[in-house]
Amino acid sequence: MVAGDDRLRFVCDGCHTIHYENPKMVVGTIPVMDKTILLCRRAIEPCRGKWTLPAGWLENGETVSGCALRETQEEACAEVDDLQPYVLANLPFINQVYFFLRARLVNTTFHAGAESLEVKLFSPEAIPWDELAFSAVHDTLRFFCDDVKKSAFPFRILDIKPQHHQSNDIG
């Protein structure tokens, strides 16, 4: 324990530097065009072959919106704009936070990036629910599909519980 702190920390015995470990943030978009959603089939582990929203790790020195744009470009070679905060999902049992932004898909020139096997537009009724990669993506898409029916998209904070997560919820 470090004096004045309430958590165990890694401290170097030699120089006494405190090494803080903080949650990783995953940032992504819900790219939408005419009430269809762009999903990516993963080409990498974890969850190779499963569908997900374009998302990835927030990098040091990067803004949340910059990360969302970059990850959408990297995974789906897609251009989006009109980013709107939509879901923040806490997964404390794996030390991750997901942040999804609604986005307008600018055109249909998207295609699979290096981390995707394919990318495809899905109507809410056609989403491959049993083939989704992560519980945060699943829950976000469920809320989104319900919100499309109401034409209202409130910002949500979700606390995903360990018993709720899928075994593939890993970094």
Image (tube, rainbow, N blue to C red):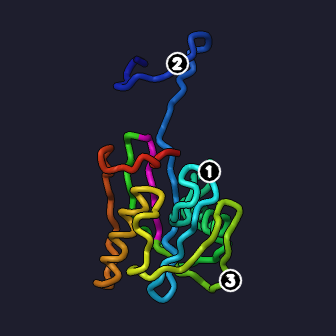
Judging by the rendered image, the residue that carries numbered circle 1 is 59
Mark 1 vs mark 3: in front:
3
Distance from Cα at disc 2 to Cα at disc 1:
24 Å
- The disc labelled 1 sits on which kind of residue? Glu
Query: Which residue is pictured at 39% across the width and 69% down the height?
Result: 141
Is there CB contact under 8 Å for labels 2 and 1? no
State which mark lies toward you, 3 or 2.
3
**Residue type at the position of mark 2:** Val
Counting labels gives 3
Tell me if mark 3 has few (under 14), some (14-19) or many (20+) residues whose alpha carbon lies within 10 angstroms of its own: few
Residue behind mark 3: 109
Looking at the rendered structure, the secondary structure element under dot 2 is strand
Dot 1 or dot 3: first in sequence order is 1
Which residue is at the far top? 14
In the rendered structure, find residue 11 and report the number of the disc placed on it: 2
Query: In the image, 171: left or right of 4?
Result: right
Q: Is residue 61 magenta?
A: no
Residue at (62%, 50%) from the top-left corner?
Answer: 59
Helix, strand or loop at disc 1? Answer: loop
Please say if 122 is above or below 20: below
Taking the spot 46% from the left edge, 23% from the top edge, the residue there is: 9
* Among numbered discs 3 and 2, the one appearing first in the sequence: 2
Q: Quadrant of residue 65?
A: bottom right
Per the picture, the main secondary structure of the magenta-coloured stretch is strand
Q: Is residue 97 magenta?
A: yes
Cα–Cα gap, marks 3 and 2: 50 Å
Whole-percent x and y of residue 88? 39, 58
Pick the front one: 33 or 66: 33
